[in-house]
Each structure stands twice: as structure tokens, then as C-alpha cells.
Image: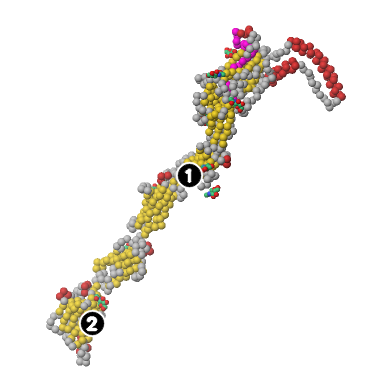
């Protein structure tokens, strides 16, 4: 500064000489700066705003700081300069009017105006600008808040320990930033508009004044996210089955990487880094899972849902049935309860508009086109499609069955059962004649109505009625009449063993006959085991005597110890308690009877005649044979009635014994051991079969 001051003074002297030379020629004040009018000064240094003037001696000069006069003095005067009190330490006026600042502080940056006046002369003015600087030191560039993408404004500002900045320059990744729509450079800051992740990078501020310059950096990271969330259930399936294992994960992009947390309703399941493992998943774990993604620093949040479906098949299989409503309508049922979700049940062939769940039913008026029609229920479940079928049908033709037993109190119990296959199950009703059977002591009807029991002490007309059972359902009905008969026997026959000592009697009972037992009767010699009457064998041959009594279930009996040389006759008397029915046919066993001694003698005598006749006949045949070869005939052999009968009797017994080597057409022994109820048999027809006539009669 010393050189500046010296130079100023030299100039002032030079200018003074110059102005004196023109004084006579012109009386005008001229003031001019010595050196530059823009003066930069470092704070604390000495600086002088140097002026020179011409046109007058000892003019009055005034320095104004801005608009404020701070120094006034008449040059050359003894009177000391008038300096504003609080600036006396800094401001000093030189003899030639220049203004000197001693240890100039920062606050003296201003426009200074030098005014010079002299009475009678026009005022002359010149101006300076003084800028006082400090060295720039310790600049810190800061971001007052997180840089978060999407913010409208984001500010970077610098601070420093000291310094006066004359020029600032901002750079982004070393490229200069100019104020534009994206950036605004303010006095001590840079404002970024519409912050985005592309603004992440190194920001530099370059600060400069005439005495120093500083460059400072800051790395700005723009936080973003969470965004582009990915929610995923693996394995990816439209639904899961209970018991399945799956994992649900949740993640999103962002900086820093967002954290993920799952919650399910009010529960917060165990999870790790946004991965939720569900093992053996149950239906109550189905629903909406919410993942909350948070970027820790920015507190930005994102929530996403995923819906998990966990299904369970209904247990068992769908069941179809058809039921009767008031014996008028048909109600088709389809049942498949349980499961998640419930199966949708429908009868597409019956209705294409209605469907239901758990227990679904449709009611229809019974009509012929439903009879025998198989109706399928479609059971739709996401896990499985299933179905069941049911066929409604009118009652089938059926045969009633009959059982007879004796109750403990000695009553005959006749049970008639009517079962007709039908769907829905047929309702059975009973009538006797034209009247409905009323249950009571005589009539008992089973709870399912298929059995009618008739209780009575004896086979009176009371029992021997026409009973009708009728089986009906909405689709139709079938009725059958049962005409109960008193005790009777059909198909009585007899077989004997090879040597004729044992005979087996077999018989049948008409299906509608009420029988509780049988008397086996024999006419002939007493049997050998009745030793006491062994000598009276032929004594009582004329009367049938009961030799055995058998229960109603028995259909055969063996008679032992017969003498093959004797003749026996057998018959069976069916009984219903005390009431005896018509006796069976009589079967005879033993040598033929009815040939008188004379007849035998006749036959014996006839034999030689017959032989002769045969010889003659042979001759006749011989001639016939030779006369007409095409007309060979057997000549009928005339046999007497007695012989014919004998042969017939033999045919009934001996030849068969020879052929079978024992019993003729052996009886069905399986049948003999059957229990009474098994013995009951369906009635093949309701006309009792015609009794089989046996050749042998008495
Ligand atoms: C400024 O002037 C004052 C008084 O004349 C003097 O004491 C000081 O040393 C000067 N300062 C400099 C830096 O020249
Ligand atoms: C000095 O004057 C100029 C123009 O006349 C003006 O722009 C500037 O602001 C002034 N400086 C101060 C510190 O008053
Ligand atoms: C800014 O980032 C650059 C590289 O990315 C690195 O070299 C530098 O040290 C970082 N500066 C600060 C202040 O973190
Ligand atoms: C989920 O399962 C995977 C692999 O099966 C395993 O790596 C992970 O740690 C499990 N996470 C949790 C929270 O159990
Ligand atoms: C149901 O069936 C009737 C005739 O059977 C038919 O006209 C109708 O379009 C069907 N409706 C639907 C929804 O399939
Ligand atoms: C059955 O038929 C009668 C008339 O015949 C009718 O009124 C009734 O609605 C029908 N019911 C059903 C279930 O179809
Ligand atoms: C009806 O009831 C009787 C006895 O209660 C039973 O023996 C019979 O099996 C039943 N019939 C049907 C078809 O349920
Ligand atoms: C049947 O029994 C009743 C009384 O129990 C009796 O009055 C009637 O005479 C009996 N009828 C026959 C045929 O035995
Ligand atoms: C039972 O019906 C048959 C023929 O239908 C009839 O001949 C008989 O008299 C009836 N018996 C009774 C007891 O009504
Ligand atoms: C023949 O009769 C005797 C007893 O007289 C008997 O022991 C034997 O078993 C009978 N033979 C046949 C084949 O029945
Ligand atoms: C022979 O005696 C036995 C028992 O001794 C008896 O069961 C059987 O009925 C008797 N036979 C006849 C025909 O009486």
C-alpha cells in the first residue's frame, strides 16, 4: 500500500502543477480519482482512496460514505477535519483530500463520494467503491436434511468461519451449475428443484474473493423407495392345501434397501428379512397378508397385500339320496358337508340354475320321467370334483313271504313280510279284505311296516283271511294279496335205502299254508325197536298211528329198522297247533299186495302157454318179415292187469334202487337243517301248486 500512497501523492503533485497552468484560463473545479475507482482491500489493511483536483486553492471537500458525509475539511486549513465521531479511528484525510482507512474493518465496504466545493464555483464530484474482504476460511458444505427423492426443494448450503465471498460457483460432478429451472443459486446456498435420484453425486462449491479462494465438496445421496415391491408366494399356486408348506416373500427397491415386515390380521408371524415360512399351513391361516416396506432414513412407507387361499377337501364323498315328501313329491338330496371352501352342489340334469352347499335338495312333483332316471349331483370343490348319483324308482314287483311260529304263550304267530325294492323306500300299508289292518293284540305291524304279525290261539277263520300289502312311494305302488291257507301238505314222497331197512319221507308245504308241526303216521307192522310188541307185528296193520311228531320247520324224516319183506304205509298230517289239516297222500313201501293166490296160480299156469304163444308168434313174425321187409313191427304183448300192477309197483322202487345204489333221488339234506325263519319262502305264485298225485294209493 505504501507504493500506492506514494504513487498517489506523485500524481497529486503532477495534477496540481497541471491545474495551476490552466488556472488563469478557466476557473472551474475538476476532481478526478487517482488510480482505479473500484478498490478491493483486505480487512485490517490500510487503504487510500486517492483524488486530485484543479480549479481552486483550498476548496472545501466532503467524503460521503453512501449518502452519509463522514469527513469534511477545507484543504490547507488549520482547522482539523471534521470526522464523524465513531469513524475517527479508521478514517483519515490526507492533505490533498485523499481518504485513508487505517486497519479497515469489513463494515467499510461502501460507495464513497468525494465532493469538492468552492464559493463561486460549481461543485465537482468523483466516486469510489471500496470493498473490504476477509480471507475465506473453513468452509463447510452441509445438507440440512435428508435428500429424499420427490422433494420439491432441496438446499445445500455452506458455512464458514470467516470470509467475504465475492464469487461463488457450484459444480455437480465437476460440471458447473447454472441457475435454471432445476437449480437456483442463492447467496449462500444451492437449491435443487424436484429432487430425483439422478441428483445423487458430488457437489462442489467454489468460493472466491480477490484475496482467497476455497473449494469444498459434499457427497449427496438421494434416498428413494420403497418402490417396485415384489410380493411372492412360493411355490406359486392359485391356492394351497392344508398341510402344504410355502413361503411368502416381500421386497422392494430403494436406497437404502427398505426393510420388510409381514403382518396377518393382528398377528405378526415369525419372519426373517421379509420371508415368511408357512409350514403345515391350515385353513385359518388363509387370508390377507400385509407387507409393510419402510426405508429407514426417509421413513417412507409402502404397504402391499397378498391373499393366500388355503383349501381343504370335504371329508368322505358326496352322498345322494331321494326321499319322499308326503308320498307325493320327490326330494333329491346331495350332501357333502365340510371342506374349505364348501363344495358347490348341483343337480345339472334337474336344474341348471340352482345350487347349494353342504346339504342341497331339490323337490319335484313325482312324474313318470323321473321314474328310473339316474340323477347325478355334481359336487364342485376347488380341490376335487366329485359326484354321486341316485335313481328314483317306483316299487318293484315283489313276493310276500310267510313265517309261522308258536309264541311262548302258545299262540300261532303268522308273519307276512312285504318288501318291495323302491327309491325312495316304499311305504307299506296292510289291509284285510277292504279294511285297513289296525295294530292291536291280534295284529302287530313292525316299526318299518314291512312285517305284519297275526297272533291267535288257533287257525280259525280269523287267521285265514285275505291280507293285502301295498308298497307305495311317490312314483307308484305295488300290491299283493296273500290268502292264508290252513295246514296242508304238497309233494309228499318216499325213498328207501338199498336193502329197504330205512325209509326217508319228504314233503312240502304250500307257501301260504299255516303250519306249526307234523304228525308222521304209519300203518303196518310195529317197528323193531318197540321190542315189547315185536310179536304183534301184523296185529295193528289196519290203523295209521303217529310214530313221530315234527316241528313246522321240518320237511323230511327218516324211519329206521324196517323189514324189507313187509309192507308199510306212511302219511303226514300237517298241524297248526291243535288244528289238523288234510292228511297227505299215502306212500307205500314193501312187496305188492292185492294178488290173490288164484291169480298167482293163474300166472304160473300161464307161463308155459305164453312160451308156446311166443314160439307161434316168432314164426308169424318170421313170415311177416319175409313178406314185407319195410313193415317191421313189434307186436303188443298182452299183459294181465295184475301183472301190470306188479310191474308198476316194481318200477316205483326196485329199478331205481339198483340204478342209484341206495336212495332214489336223494332228498336235499341241506334243507332239513334250516331254521324256521330260513324255511320261510317267497311265494312263487298265489295259486297253490296242484298236489302231485303219486301212483301208489290206498
Ligand atoms: C497502517 O497505518 C498505521 C498508522 O499510520 C500504521 O501504524 C500501520 O502499521 C499501518 N499498517 C500497515 C499494514 O501498513
Ligand atoms: C455503489 O453504487 C453502485 C451504482 O451506483 C450501486 O450499484 C452499489 O450498490 C453501490 N454500493 C453500495 C455498497 O452502496
Ligand atoms: C465422495 O465420493 C467420492 C467418490 O464417490 C469419494 O472419493 C469422496 O471421498 C467422497 N467424499 C466425501 C466427503 O465423502
Ligand atoms: C424359511 O425357509 C428358508 C429355506 O427353506 C430358510 O432359508 C429361511 O431361513 C426360513 N426363514 C424363516 C424365517 O424361518
Ligand atoms: C337351463 O336349461 C334350460 C332348458 O333346459 C335352458 O333354456 C336355459 O338356457 C338353461 N340355463 C342356463 C343358465 O344354462
Ligand atoms: C306340483 O304340481 C302342482 C300342480 O300339479 C303345483 O302346484 C306344484 O307347484 C308342483 N310342485 C312342485 C314342487 O313342482
Ligand atoms: C323291518 O323291521 C323288521 C323288524 O323290526 C326287520 O327284521 C326288517 O329287516 C326291517 N326291514 C327293513 C326293510 O328295514
Ligand atoms: C279257537 O280258539 C277259540 C278260543 O281261543 C275257540 O273258541 C275256538 O273254538 C277255537 N277254534 C277251533 C277251530 O279250535
Ligand atoms: C280270498 O280271495 C279269494 C279269491 O280272491 C276268494 O275266493 C276267497 O273267498 C277270499 N277269502 C276270504 C276269507 O275273503
Ligand atoms: C342193510 O341192512 C343192514 C342191517 O340189516 C345194515 O347194517 C346195512 O347198513 C344196510 N345196508 C345199506 C346199504 O343200507
Ligand atoms: C324207536 O325208539 C326210539 C327211542 O328208543 C324212538 O325215538 C322212536 O320213535 C322209536 N320208533 C318208533 C317207530 O316208535
Viewer-nearest of discs 2 and 1: 1
Q: Which residues are magenta?
A: 512-532
Q: Give the SS element for disc 2.
A: strand
Viewer-proximal residue among 578 and 49: 578
Q: Is residue 404 visible?
A: no
The quadrant of the image that shows the C terminus is top right
The residue furthest front is: 434
> Residue 462 lies in what quarter of the image?
top right
Mark 1 sits near ligand 6, with its Cβ under 8 Å away: no
Q: Is residue 580 visible?
A: yes
Residue drawn at (52%, 30%) of the image: 449
Estimate the x, y position of residue 350 in percent, counting from the top left: 53, 44
Q: Which residue is mark 1?
A: 356
> Residue 552 lies in what quarter of the image?
top right
Q: Mark 1: few, some, or many residues within 10 Å (few <14, many ≥20)?
A: some
| C-alpha distance separating marks 2 and 1 | 106 Å
Q: Indicate the colouring scheme.
A: secondary structure
Estimate the x, y position of residue 323 in percent, counting from the top left: 51, 38
Viewer-proximal residue among 484 and 362: 484
Q: Is residue 125 above or below residue 256?
A: below
Residue 529 belongs to magenta span = yes
Amino acid at each position: 500500500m505504501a507504493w500506492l500512497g506514494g504513487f498517489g501523492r506523485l500524481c497529486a503533485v503532477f495534477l496540481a502543477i497541471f491545474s495551476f497552468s490552466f488556472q488563469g484560463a478557466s476557473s472551474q473545479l475538476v476532481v478526478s480519482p487517482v488510480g482505479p475507482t473500484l478498490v478491493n482491500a483486505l480487512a485490517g489493511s490500510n487503504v487510500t482512496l486517492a483524488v486530485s483536483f484543479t480549479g481552486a486553492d483550498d476548496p472545501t471537500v466532503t467524503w460521503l460514505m453512501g449518502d452519509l458525509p463522514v469527513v469534511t475539511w477545507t484543504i490547507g486549513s488549520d482547522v482539523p477535519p471534521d470526522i464523524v465521531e465513531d469513524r475517527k479511528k479508521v478514517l483519515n484525510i490526507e492533505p490533498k483530500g485523499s481518504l485513508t482507512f487505517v486497519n479497515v474493518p469489513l463494515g467499510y465496504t461502501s460507495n464513497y463520494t468525494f465532493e469538492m466545493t468552492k464559493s463561486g464555483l460549481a461543485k465537482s464530484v468523483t466516486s469510489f467503491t471500496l470493498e473490504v474482504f476477509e480471507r475465506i476460511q473453513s468452509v463447510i458444505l452441509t445438507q440440512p436434511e435428508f435428500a429424499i427423492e420427490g422433494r420439491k426443494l432441496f438446499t445445500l448450503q455452506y458455512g464458514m468461519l470467516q470470509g467475504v465471498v465475492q464469487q461463488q460457483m457450484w459444480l455437480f460432478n465437476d460440471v458447473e451449475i447454472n441457475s435454471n429451472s432445476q437449480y437456483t443459486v442463492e447467496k449462500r446456498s444451492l437449491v435443487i428443484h424436484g429432487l430425483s435420484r439422478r441428483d445423487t453425486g458430488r457437489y462442489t462449491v467454489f468460493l472466491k474473493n480477490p484475496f482467497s479462494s476455497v473449494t469444498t465438496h459434499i457427497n449427496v445421496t438421494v434416498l428413494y423407495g420403497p418402490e417396485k415391491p415384489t410380493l411372492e408366494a412360493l411355490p406359486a399356486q392359485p391356492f394351497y392345501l392344508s398341510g402344504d408348506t410355502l413361503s411368502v416373500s416381500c421386497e422392494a427397491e430403494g436406497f437404502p434397501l427398505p426393510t420388510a415386515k409381514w403382518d396377518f390380521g393382528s398377528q405378526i408371524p415369525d419372519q426373517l428379512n421379509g420371508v415368511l415360512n408357512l409350514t403345515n399351513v391350515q385353513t385359518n391361516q388363509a387370508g390377507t397378508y400385509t407387507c409393510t416396506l419402510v426405508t429407514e432414513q426417509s421413513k417412507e412407507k409402502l404397504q402391499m397385500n397378498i391373499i393366500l387361499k388355503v383349501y381343504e377337501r370335504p371329508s368322505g364323498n358326496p352322498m345322494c339320496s331321494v326321499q319322499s315328501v308326503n308320498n307325493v313329491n320327490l326330494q333329491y338330496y346331495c350332501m357333502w358337508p365340510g371342506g374349505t371352501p364348501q363344495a358347490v352342489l348341483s343337480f345339472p340334469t334337474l336344474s341348471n340354475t340352482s345350487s347349494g352347499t353342504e346339504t342341497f335338495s331339490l323337490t319335484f312333483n313325482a312324474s313318470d320321467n323321473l321314474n328310473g332316471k339316474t340323477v347325478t349331483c355334481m359336487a364342485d370343490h376347488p380341490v376335487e370334483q366329485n359326484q354321486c348319483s341316485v335313481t328314483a324308482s317306483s316299487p318293484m314287483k315283489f313276493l310276500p313271504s310267510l313265517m309261522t311260529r308258536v309264541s311262548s304263550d302258545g299262540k300261532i304267530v303268522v308273519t307276512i313280510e312285504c318288501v318291495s325294492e323302491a327309491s325312495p323306500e316304499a311305504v307299506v300299508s296292510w289291509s284285510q279284505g277292504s279294511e285297513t289292518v289296525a295294530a292291536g293284540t291280534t295284529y302287530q305291524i313292525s316299526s318299518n311296516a314291512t312285517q305284519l304279525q297275526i297272533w291267535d290261539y288257533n287257525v280259525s277263520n280269523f287267521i285265514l283271511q285275505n291280507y293285502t300289502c301295498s308298497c307305495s312311494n311317490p312314483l307308484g305302488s305295488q300290491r299283493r294279496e296273500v290268502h292264508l291257507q290252513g295246514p296242508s301238505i304238497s309233494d309228499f314222497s318216499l325213498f328207501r335205502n338199498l336193502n329197504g331197512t330205512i325209509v326217508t319221507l319228504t314233503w312240502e308245504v304250500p307257501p301260504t299254508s299255516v303250519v306249526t308241526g307234523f304228525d308222521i303216521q304209519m300203518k303196518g307192522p310195529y317197528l323193531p325197536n318197540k321190542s315189547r310188541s315185536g310179536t304183534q307185528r301184523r296185529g295193528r296193520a289196519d290203523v295209521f298211528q303217529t310214530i313221530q311228531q315234527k316241528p313246522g320247520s321240518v320237511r323230511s324224516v327218516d324211519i329206521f329198522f324196517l323189514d324189507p319183506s313187509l309192507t308199510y304205509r306212511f302219511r303226514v298230517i300237517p298241524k297248526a297247533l291243535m288244528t289238523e289239516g288234510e292228511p297227505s297222500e299215502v306212500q307205500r313201501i314193501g312187496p305188492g299186495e292185492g294178488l290173490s293166490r288164484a291169480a298167482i296160480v293163474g300166472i304160473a299156469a300161464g307161463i308155459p302157454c305164453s312160451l308156446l304163444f311166443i314160439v307161434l308168434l316168432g314164426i308169424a313174425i318170421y313170415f311177416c318179415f319175409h313178406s314185407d321187409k319195410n313193415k317191421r313191427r313189434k307186436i303188443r304183448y298182452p299183459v294181465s292187469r295184475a301183472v301190470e300192477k306188479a310191474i308198476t309197483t316194481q318200477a316205483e322202487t326196485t329199478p331205481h334202487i339198483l340204478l342209484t345204489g341206495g336212495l332214489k333221488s336223494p332228498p336235499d339234506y341241506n334243507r332239513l337243517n334250516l331254521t324256521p325263519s330260513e324255511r320261510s319262502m317267497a311265494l312263487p305264485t298265489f295259486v297253490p301248486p296242484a298236489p302231485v298225485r303219486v301212483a301208489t294209493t290206498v
